[in-house]
Image: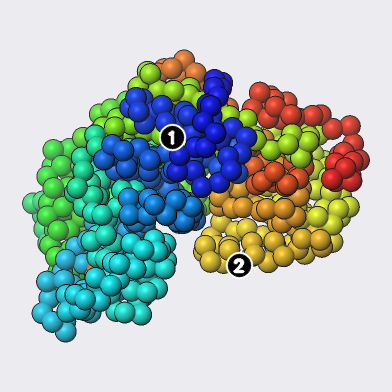
Amino acid sequence: MILKSIEASEIELFPYKPRKFQREIVLAIRESLESGTPLVLESGTGSGKTVCAVSQALKFSIENGKKIIYITRTNAQQRQVITEVRNIRKRFPEFKEDIFTVGVQGRAHTCLLARSDPELSKGSAEELSRFCSEMKKRKRGDGCPYFENMNDKFDEVEKLGEWIKDYIPTTEEIIERCRTLVMCPYELNKIMVGDANLVVAPYIYVFDDRLRNLLLDLMGVSEEDAVLIIDEAHNLPEYLRDLLSSYLSVYAVNQCITESERFGDPFIFKSIKLSNFLLVVRDAIDQIRSDFLRENENDALLSEDTFLSIISDSLDITRKDIRSIAEQLVLIGEEIKEIKQREKKLPRSYIYRLGVFLLSWIDMDDERFVRLVVDETEGKNPRIEIYCLDPSLGAEPIERFHTSIHMSGTLSPLEEYKDSLSLPEDTRLLSFPSPFPKENRKIIYSPAVSTKYEEIKFSDDMVDKIKSMIVEICNNFNRNTIVFFPSFDLMNDFINRGLVKEIKRTIYLERREMRQDELMDIVLKFKKGRGKGNVMLSVVGGRISEGMDFPAEELEIAIIVGIPYPRPTARQKALQNYYDKKFGKGWEYAVNAPTARKLLQSIGRLIRDEKDRGIAVILDRRASRFRKYLGDLKISGGIIKDIRDFLEAG
Ligand code: SF4
C-alpha cells in the first residue's frame, strides 16, 4: 500500500470535512485524472470514496472539458452519486451552473408502457428499442401517448428540463413526475444527457457497444474525452463473464416450439420441418444431461461435437447443413420479431435466439470459452452453455477512456483484479485501511467446526454442532443478527434440521426467488428489531451481503457459517485451469480471491460509520487461511464469552 499526504487545507469541491484517508484518496484520484493512468482503489465501506471520486472528477471536468461516465450496479448506488452531486452544488453554489448530472436507466426501467406491462418489462435493451421505435412512428392515437404528449407540449418539456437542471432528481423522481405529466422519462433523459458533465449509468452502458455508442453520441464526446468511474468494481469480472456467455435451455426450445405453432412450421432443410428440428434439439439437450451429468453434479464440460453429432445423427445431416439451418432460423426469427413489433408486442423470438446460439456453438473456437451442460432443476430445465472464462475480452472498452477509476470496498488481491481485466501495466493499485476505530469491529472464528464438504457430508454431528452454535448465539443476545450461509441449499439443510424452531427470536428468511420489493420488505422489518434482537437468515454473495446498509444497532452480530469457497463444479475447475495456464495462479485467482471478497462483503455489513460497532463470528476453522485479508481475525476460546465481552465494552 502506498500512502501519501497532501498539504491542501481545503480540498476543492469537497462538500464535507475530510475524514481519515480521504485526502489521500483524493490525491490518488487527482493523479489518475491528470496523468490518464488507470487507478484501482480499495477503500472500506463507509470510507466516503464516492464523494472523493465525484468531487474530483467534476473539478477535472470543469477545468478540462472532459465528461464523466460513472457506472454502478444498483439503483441505490446511482442515487448515492446524485445525492453527492446535490451536496456539492449546495456547498459550492458558485459552481452550480458548471455542474450537472443525469442518472440514466434503460427502457425496462424508464419506459412507462413497459413498466405497466409484465411481458414488456422483461424485454432486453434491443427488444425495447425496437418496440419503442414502432410506437413512435405510429399514427397519432395509435402510438405512444407519452411520446406524443412530449411532441405536443414543448413548453412543458422545457419546464421539466429546467426543473431537472435545477434540482438534479433521481431517476425515480423523474419517472414519477413524468408519469403525472404524461411524458416519457427515457426520452426526457436522452435530451438532458447532452448538457450533463457527469452521467451515472448501469454497467451495460459501457460494455455493450451499441449502448456505449448511443450514450457517447448523446453526451457529444468520444471515449478519450471521457473519464470512466466504476463503482463496486469487484463485481466487474463476473459481470463481464456473464455478459459474454450464452445458453440454450429446454425451456427456450419449448418456447421455439410454441412460436412455430403460432407463426408457421416451414421446411427448413430438404424434408426437415422446423418443428421436427426443434424436437431433435430438445431431445439432444435431455440426452446430454443424462449421459454426462453424474449424481450430485450440476454441470459437466462438453466438446463441440457432443451436441452437434446427436443432431446430425438423428437427422442424417452434416455440420454444414446444421449451419445452414441455423442461418435459416435467424431469418425466420427476424420475421417473427417484425410481426410482433407490428402487433405492438415485445419483438422477441426464441427461434431467432436459437439460430444465433447455434451459430456461436458451431463457430466458437477459442480456449477462452468452454462448453457445458448444466442442470440445477433436477431434469426439468437443463441447458447447454457457452461460458466465457476470460473477462478481459469484454473489458476492452475501458482502455479507450481518458482514464478509468475502479473502486470498491473489497478488491484485494488488487493484482488479481488488474490481471483479470488485463488493465495496463502502469495501472496504480492502492488499498486504504478502514478509517473507523479498530476496536469497533471484532472478527473471531471457531476452531471446533468446519463446513468442509467431507466433514458435513458424512457427519450429522458436525451440522448439529454448527446448528447449536448458531442457536446459542441468537438466543443469548438480544441484538440484531444476520446468519450468512454459503448457499441457499445449505441454509435449507439447517432449516430442515429445526434451526428456525430452536431460535427464540423473530426470524426473517432471504429466499433465492424473492422479488426485490419482497426482500426490501423483510429487510425493513428486520431492521426494526434493534433492541429486541431480530434474526435474518441469508447467504454470502447474495443481495443482502453485497449491497445493503445496516447502520448502528440495525446489525450488531454477523454469523458466517463456513468459508464460502466456490463449489468444485466443472465450470469452476475450468476457470481455475484457465487462470493456472494464463497466470500460474489458478487457486489464488479463481478460488481464494472470490472467497475472501465474499467474506469481507458480509463482514462489511457491520460497520458503516465511525460510531458503528459489530462482531463477526466465522464458524469454520479454515478462516485462519484468510488472515491476510481479515487482519484483525482472532481464534475464539469461547464464542459466547467473546461476544459478551465485546458487546459490554461498547
Ligand atoms: S417513447 Fe418512452 S414511453 Fe413511449 S415507448 Fe418509447 S420509451 Fe416507452
Which residue of the protein is positioned furthest toward the left in this rendering? 270
- Numbered circle sitting on residue 521: 2
> N-terminal of the two: label 1 or label 2?
1
Residue at 24%, 72% in the rendered image:
157
As measured in the structure, the alpha-carbon distance from the residue carrying label 1 to the one carrying label 2 is: 32 Å
Q: Nearer the viewer, residue 475 or 429?
A: 429
Q: Position of residue 234 (x, y in %)?
A: 49, 37
Amino acid marked by disc 2: Asp
Height in image: 342 above or below 503?
below
Residue 169 visible in the shown view: yes
Label 2: few (<14), some (14–19) or many (≥20) C-alpha neighbours in 10 Å:
few
Secondary structure beneath dot 2 equals helix
**Horizontal side of residue 127 vs 251, given as left or right:** left
| Residue 406 tag number | 1
Q: Quadrant of residue 437?
A: top right
Residue nearest the viewer, comparing 330 with 135? 135
